[in-house]
DNA sequence: CCGACATGCAACTTTCGAGTTGCGTATCAC
DNA sequence: GTGATACGCAACTCGAAAGTTGCATGTCGG
């Protein structure tokens, strides 16, 4: 089981979501992204590093520039695991509630 | 659409996952959690505040103590939205790939 | 009433992440 | 080759988050 926390840490930032949203429209380089955002290219480069480390994004060299591609797979995978945990918690709650409402059962 | 980012920010911390994991086994108070973890009660209280703010946890007064209950619903909800985004990204990628492999189609 | 346990609030370090500037290097276009 | 464009690396500032200590408040059992 790959570690979940870095993915959430990566997703817990507004600027990175702006980057991901932009990349969702199509691959782009750090410089291109810096053009339409209120931060420096280097700041974006750092964010892209974090996103890549989390497996949410993938670099693609194209000559002298490096375009980044968003990876939906990691997101879907994370979603599945999140849902599994959430469902387990809900199940436990439901069981407790049922016992509370009808203690004679079981 | 409730804001997603705070939830991820809350989930992007190791200590908070330890807390959530412990609460997954059953409701507990800050003091009880501090007993089995290498941090102060106040630190845990702060984390619980963050988790509550994110809607991942709910306080339940029980006399002089306050037990916390984990909320799977928020997690499942978040998972659904995550999956939707991830799927959309994958769809775009697949479309591009298809065009690249068979440019004459369409 | 009184001691023990549980919580709440506030001030204070300390660590970490976001963002910046500055500079060196590679690559395209002519 | 030369200028312009695109990256990469390193050092620095800065503000927020994690964690701590100290103290005041509330509540339960006897």
Image: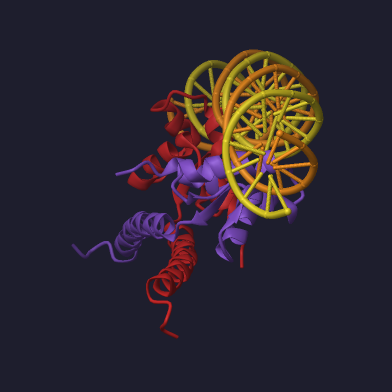
Chain colours: A red, B purple, C orange, D yellow
Residue occupying the far left of the picture: B106
Q: Can residue A3 be seen from the camera position used here?
A: no
Q: Quadrant of the C terminus of chain A?
A: bottom left
Using the image, determine if residue B6 lies above or below residue A56. Answer: above
Name the residue located 45 percent from the left edge and 55 percent from the top edge. A71
**Horizontal placement of B73 versus D28: left or right?**
left
Name the residue located 66 percent from the left edge and 49 percent from the top edge. B15
Using the image, determine if residue A90 lies above or below residue A30. Answer: below
Name the residue located 50 percent from the left edge and 52 percent from the top edge. A56
- Residue A77 location, x and y as percent? 47, 64
A49 or A2: nearer the viewer: A2
Q: Quadrant of the N terminus of chain A?
A: bottom right
- Residue B70 location, x and y as percent? 50, 57
- Residue B36 location, x and y as percent? 74, 56
Q: Can residue A57 be seen from the camera position used here?
A: yes
**Horizontal placement of A65 versus B1: left or right?**
right
A31 or C27: nearer the viewer: A31
The quadrant where residue D10 appears: top right
């Amino acid at each position: 089981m790959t570690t979940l926390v870095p993915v959430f840490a990566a997703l817990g930032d507004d600027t990175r979501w702006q980057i991901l949203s932009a990349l969702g429209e199509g691959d782009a380089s750090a410089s291109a992204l810096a053009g339409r955002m209120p931060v420096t290219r280097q700041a974006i480069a750092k964010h892209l590093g974090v996103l890549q480390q989390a497996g949410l994004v993938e670099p693609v060299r194209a000559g002298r520039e490096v375009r980044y591609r968003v990876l939906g797979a990691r997101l879907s995978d994370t979603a599945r695991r999140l849902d599994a945990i959430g469902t387990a918690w809900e199940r436990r709650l439901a069981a407790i509630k049922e016992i509370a409402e009808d203690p004679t059962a079981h």
